[in-house]
Amino acid sequence: MSRARLLIMVSTAALLAAVAACGQSDTKSDMPPLPASATAPVTFERDIHSWAQPAIARVNHVDLDLVADFTAKTLSGTATLDVTGEPGATQVILDIKNLEIRSVADDKGNPLQFALGAEDPIKGQALTVTVPAFEPGKVQKIVVTYSTRPDAAALQWLTPAQTAGGRQPFLFSQGQAILTRTWVPTQDSPGIRQTYSAKITVPEALTAVMSAEMLTPDGERAADGMHAYRFRMTNPVPPYLIALAVGDLKFASEGARVGVWTEPGRLDAAKAEFSEMGQLVDAAEALYGPYRWGRYDLLILPPSFPFGGMENPRLTFATPTVVAGDKSLVSLVAHELAHSWSGNLVTNATWADIWLNEGTTTYFENRIMEAVYGRDRALMLQVLGWNDLQSSLADMAPLDTRLHVDLDGRDPDDGLNDIPYEKGAAFLRTIERIVGRERFDAWLKGYFERNAFRPMTAGGFLVDIRANLVRGDSALERELQLDNWVYQPGLPSNAQAPVSTALTAVDTAADAFFADKGPASAIPWSGWSTQERQHFLAWRPEGAAATRPWLTNAQLADLETTLNLRAEGNAEVLFQWLQIAVAHRYQPAVPTLERFLTSQGRRKFVLPLYTSLWGQGDWGRPIATRVYATARPGYHPVTTGSVDNVVGVPAA
C-alpha cells in the first residue's frame, strides 16, 4: 500500500462547532473537556478500505434519528452529517454498503444531488453528494434519509428464542472493522474521527443503549406505543465505535462510574463476576493517566456476539462466555478497558496498523492484571499468549507476520489474528525490558497524552518513540530493533519468551500424562487455575508428531471422565479440550462439541473448531456440515463470513 499522506488542516472553530451541535439537552456531560491534541491539525493516511477523501471534505459529526422495526428487521430514519471542506470543494464522499438511500438534502430540506458508485465486495459503494462550495470554517449539514436492509452485516436481529430471557427480541451492532457503513452512511475510516448523537426509537418493552452518554435513561414516549432514547458522544471517535444494542435490559451499578447491563435473568451472575471492575479502572488510570470517557459500563450480550469483547466507548460489549462463575476470565474486561487508551484514545489510522490498537492493548491489559491480580497470573497470561503467537508464526505466510501488514485487496478482518495482538505486546515488553519499566511507563503515558483523540500510523509511532524515548541514543536504537519489529516478518533476535514457574509445573504434569506415564487422576486439576488448565490442554508434542494423534483412546476417555470435561462450563477450557477431541476423531465428545457450537457464536472458538473438523476429512466434514446447518442462523455475520469460507453455506 502506498504510504503517501494527505494533509488537511481541521480548523478549531469548525470542530468546536461540530462538538457543540451534538448537545441535545441541558444535561451536564460527565466527560472531561477535550485536550488540545483533539483540535490540532490532523494528518490523514490514505485508507484503502474507504472511498472517502477527507483532505477534500470530511465528516465531523453524525446525528442519528432512527426507528428500530423488529418485524422488518430494519433501522430507518435520518443521519444528519456535519461536514467541513476545503474552500471551493463541492463534493462529499461517504461510505455505504447494502443501504437503501431514499433522499439526500441540506438541513433546510433542499434536495442535494447524489450518486452511488459501483459496488465493491469489500468496500461497498461510494455515496457522492454534491454540495454548495465550501467556505473557510463553515460547517455544512447533509441529511441522508435511508433504511438498513435485513441482512446488514453490522446488525444482528435476534428472535426471543435466541435470547436468555426468551420473551423479547434483541438487536446489537458490531462495526469493526468496516461494517458501520452497513447501518450508518458516513466516512467509515478509523482515521476520520467523529462525534455523534442519536435518537433511537424502539418498542416500549425494550431499552436502547449506545456507546455514548445516555441522556434519557428512562426513555421518552413516542408515537404508536414506542419509546425513544437519546445519546451523545462529545469525544470524537472512529466510526467503528458507534454502537447500538436494543433488548430487554437491566442495569446494576458496581460503583460511582462502573456497572453492568444485561438481560434480567443474567444480571446477578454478571454483577458478581465483574464486581472488581472499579479496581481495574483505578489500576489503569494509575498506570497511564485519566480515563477520559466518563463512565465505564459493561453490556453482556446474547451468545451470538462474535467477539470476546468490543471496546465501544463507555459501554464494552462482551460475550456471555466470559461469565465463568469464578472471575477467571476477567482479563477480557481488562483488555477492553485498556482500549479506552490504546484504540479509542489513540487509534490506528488504517487497518494495516491494527497492531497499534491491539498490541498496545494486550500489553496494557497484562499490566492491569498484574496490578490487580498479581505477577504470577500476569505471567501465565503472557505465556499463553506467547504460545498462541508461536503457533501463528508457524502457520502463517511470512509477510503476514509483520506488524505493519499489507491488506490491499483484502478484507481488514484478515489482519485480526495473533500477530497484531501477541507480537505487538511482545514488542512493547521487549522495549520495557531494555529501557526499564519506569522509563517505559513514562514514555507510554506521554504517548497517550500527546496523541489523544488522534489517528496513528506505524511511522508516527516510530517517530514518537524515537523522539521521546530513544532520543538519539544510537546504541539503544540498535538494541531495540524498532524497524525490524514493525516491518519485518517473524520475531527479531531480541525477543524473549516469558517464563511462568506455575506453568512449568503444569508442563511436567502434561509430559507425564501425555507420555502415558500415569492416569488422569494424578493430574492436580482441582488445584489449578483456568490458565493452568488451558496450558495443560494446549500441550502438543514437538515437531512433526504434532500433526498426528498423540493420545490413545484410553487416555482420551480417562481425561474426559476424570476431569469431567463433558460438564465443563469454562468456555476457554472446553475449547481446548474439543480441539484435542477433534484432532483424535474422538466420537464420544461429538455431543459436547455440537452443544458448544450451537450455544454460542464467538468466532475465536467457532472458526478454529469448524476448521479442525473440516481438516478431518470423511470423519469431520459431515459433522461440520450438519452442525453448521443448525447453528448458522444464530451466528452473527462476522462469524458466518469466516466460517462460510471453510464449510460453505448450507443448502436452504
Image (cartoon, rainbow, N blue to C red):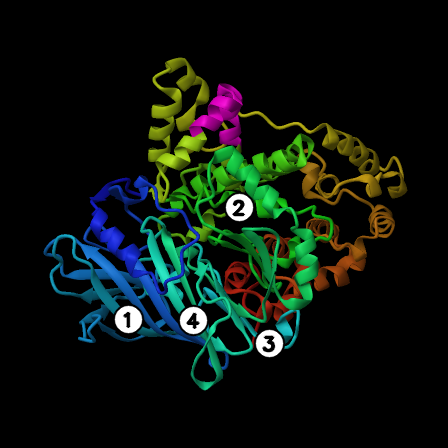
Q: Position of residue 610 (x, y in %)?
A: 62, 57
Which numbered disc covers residue 200? 4
| Along the line of sight, the residue nearer the viewer: 266 or 622 | 266
Q: Position of residue 428 (x, y in %)?
A: 49, 30
Disc 3, SS: loop
Which numbered disc covers residue 409? none
Q: Position of residue 183 (x, y in %)?
A: 39, 67
Disc 1, SS: strand
Using the numbered discs, state the Cα–Cα distance from disc 2 to disc 1 in whole angstroms. Answer: 33 Å
Crowd around label 2: few <14 · some 14–19 · many ≥20 (10 Å): many
First in sequence: mark 1 or mark 3? 1
Using the numbered discs, state the Cα–Cα distance from disc 4 to disc 1 in whole angstroms. Answer: 16 Å
Q: Which residue is mark 1?
A: 144
Q: Which residue is mark 3?
A: 168
Left or right relative to 632: residue 101: left
Amino acid type, residue under disc 3 in the picture: Gln
User: Which mark's residue is nearer the viewer, 4 or 3?
Assistant: 4
Using the numbered discs, state the Cα–Cα distance from disc 4 to disc 3 in whole angstroms. Answer: 17 Å
Q: Which residue is mark 2?
A: 337
Using the numbered discs, state the Cα–Cα distance from disc 2 to disc 3 in whole angstroms. Answer: 29 Å
Q: Position of residue 553 (x, y in %)?
A: 84, 49
